[in-house]
Amino acid sequence: MSSTTDKIRGFANQIAGKAKKAVGNAADDDKLRVEGAAQEAKGEVQQASGEAKDAIKKFIDG
């Protein structure tokens, strides 16, 4: 995947995870809160991966 794709998917997962957590909080649903937190964390990792790819490309390109 490209760095841009990683960053976009990461951002989308973070937003979806935050929404799930909010619904879980509103509905007092522990399962949704946990799923939301996991999805949000996945998004953070994806965004970090995209940033790392950008940094490596910049380093290689000089």
Image (cartoon, helix red, strand yellow):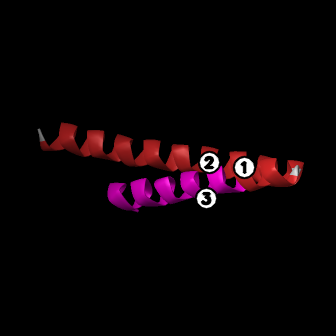
Point out residue 11 in the picture as x, y percentages from the top left corner: 48, 54
Residue type marked 1 = Lys
Inspect this view and state whether residue 2 appears: no
Give the residue pinned by disc 3.
16
Q: Secondary structure at mark 2?
A: helix
Residue at the spot 34% in from the left edge and 58% down from the top edge: 4
In the displayed structure, does residue 47 sit left or right of residue 59? Answer: right
Give the residue pinned by disc 2.
40
Quarter of the image where one finds residue 32: bottom right
Point out residue 28 in the picture as x, y percentages from the top left corner: 88, 49
Give the residue pinned by disc 1.
21
Label 2 near label 1: C-beta < 8 Å?
Answer: yes
Residue at the spot 65% in from the left edge and 55% down from the top edge: 19
Q: Nearer the N terminus, badge 2 or badge 3? A: 3
Can you say which quadrant of the picture contains the N terminus?
bottom left
Residue at the spot 63% in from the left edge and 50% down from the top edge: 18
**Label 1, label 3: how far apart the Cα atoms are:** 9 Å
Point out residue 3 in the picture as x, y percentages from the top left corner: 35, 54
Q: Which mark is residue 8?
A: none
